[in-house]
């Protein structure tokens, strides 16, 4: 198949959705398909290049930040990407279009189908579902009819968790949604042998935005420290507009010696952070299917996360699902019970190998795209 992928985020820009786009397109190329990605440029990256056999074309939208994107910047990408995608299809005659994120890329799939009868599949990530991000509430109310039209005309709609599917159905229930979970590269992310030590490292990896909930954990760190003889440390990997507030909280609670802000890291740099941690936390209010939890699991970490979207699929006997206001007691339990956390760690690794390999994910998308490819 010849597959066109439209996504305003592709590494090195973006978060978990960009990561999923990278591994999915790589996997499809490895299976013999031709894949072209139209994405946004960032700080004069090459406008055209080939990565892992995937043709990458970047349009000069108004992308200002590596980690996040405003609605204005998304609209800029949409306006610049559609003419490029249209020209590419006239030349390449793609078999289908994989739309990464209903917003902003959905209209491109819709317009290409109307003009050229090119089938399109929308893969939702979370923020593109109305109700997920409060900052876009007013905008989504205005464009709701257009969103429903785009969803209605799609050949398939894919959510990456049951929770995200349920949220999407609350907005539009007249079409079926398939569930294909995210995957993780189990060769890149793997555990190392560790012995119990007098240090206990808690790891958080994410964009630093309010929705991720780290502000509920930082004030509890001294309480956690007081509960154990081990030296507790919180390592924060990531960057974003909420970092200043989190740093202020650290100073306010006089725990500068307990928290390390490491900033944004590339995938090649991030693996040791997972491998050297003792526990991974995600106190997030909303997710789609959090890639960072999959990466932590692949590296053999126990997990404490909120009952957000994706938690039911990811957490069984490998950690705890609790509200972010109750994270402290579960972190304390992990600090105090090495035997339990070691068992959690083993289950995490086994679970990703069994259910969340990229091979399984790519196979599912390949089957879906074959079912919905263009018929001449």
Image (cartoon, helix red, strand yellow):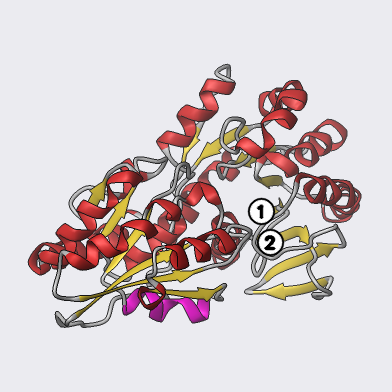
Nearer-the-camera pick, 78 or 178: 78
Residue 34 is tagged as: 2
Q: Which residues are magenta?
A: 267-276
Picture residue at 82% right of the left edge, 39% below the top: 112
Q: Are marks 2 and 1 in contact (CB under 8 Å)?
A: yes
Tell me which secondary structure the magenta stretch mostly adopts. helix
Q: Is residue 79 left or right of residue 135?
A: right
Q: Secondary structure at mark 2?
A: strand
Q: Is residue 46 left or right of residue 98?
A: right
Can the viewer see residue 347 in this picture?
no
Quarter location, residue 88:
bottom right
The question of residue 170 being in magenta is answered with no
Reading the chain from its start, which is encountered first: label 2 or label 1? 1
Q: Secondary structure at mark 1?
A: loop
Nearer-the-camera pick, 258 or 78: 258
In percent of width and height, residue 366 lies at: 54, 50
The question of residue 273 being in magenta is answered with yes
Can the viewer see residue 114 in this picture?
yes
Q: Is residue 31 left or right of residue 45?
A: left
Which residue is under mark 1? 1
Picture residue at 81% right of the left edge, 75% below the top: 46
Work out which quarter of the rendered image holds the C terminus and state it: top right
In percent of width and height, residue 317 lies at: 17, 51
In percent of width and height, residue 226 lies at: 19, 66
Nearer-the-camera pick, 86 or 284: 284
């Amino acid at each position: 198949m010849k597959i066109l992928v439209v996504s305003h985020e592709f590494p090195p820009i973006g978060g978990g959705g960009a990561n999923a786009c990278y591994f999915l397109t790589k996997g499809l190329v490895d299976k013999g398909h031709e894949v072209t990605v139209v994405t946004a440029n960032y700080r004069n990256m090459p406008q055209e290049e080939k990565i892992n056999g995937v043709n990458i074309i970047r349009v000069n939208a108004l992308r200002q930040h590596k980690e996040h994107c405003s609605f204005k910047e998304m609209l800029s990408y949409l306006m610049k990407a559609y003419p490029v995608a249209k020209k590419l299809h006239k030349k390449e005659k793609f078999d289908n279009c994989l739309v990464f994120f209903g917003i902003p890329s959905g209209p491109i799939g819709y317009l290409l189908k109307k003009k050229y009868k090119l089938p399109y599949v929308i893969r939702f990530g979370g923020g593109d579902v109305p109700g997920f991000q409060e900052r876009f509430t007013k905008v989504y109310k205005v464009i709701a009819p257009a969103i429903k039209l785009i969803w209605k005309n799609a050949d398939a709609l894919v959510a990456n968790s049951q929770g995200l599917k349920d949220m999407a159905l609350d907005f539009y229930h007249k079409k079926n949604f398939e569930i294909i979970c995210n995957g993780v590269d189990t060769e890149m992310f793997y555990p190392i042998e560790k012995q119990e030590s007098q240090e206990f490292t808690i790891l958080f990896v994410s964009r630093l935005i309010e929705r991720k909930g780290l502000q509920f954990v930082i004030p509890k760190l001294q309480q956690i420290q007081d509960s154990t003889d081990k030296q507790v440390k919180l390592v924060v990997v990531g960057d974003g507009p909420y970092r200043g507030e989190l740093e202020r909280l650290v100073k306010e609670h006089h725990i500068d010696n307990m928290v390390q802000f490491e900033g944004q890291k590339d995938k090649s740099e991030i693996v040791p952070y997972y491998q050297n941690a003792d526990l991974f936390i995600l106190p997030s209010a909303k997710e789609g299917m959090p890639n960072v939890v999959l990466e932590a699991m692949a590296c053999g970490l126990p997990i404490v996360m909120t009952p957000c979207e994706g938690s039911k699929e990811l957490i069984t006997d490998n950690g705890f699902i609790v509200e972010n206001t109750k994270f402290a007691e579960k972190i304390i339990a992990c600090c105090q019970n090495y035997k339990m956390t070691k068992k959690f760690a083993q289950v995490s690794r086994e679970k990703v190998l069994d259910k969340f390999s990229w091979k399984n994910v790519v196979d599912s998308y390949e089957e879906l795209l074959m079912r919905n490819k263009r018929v001449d």
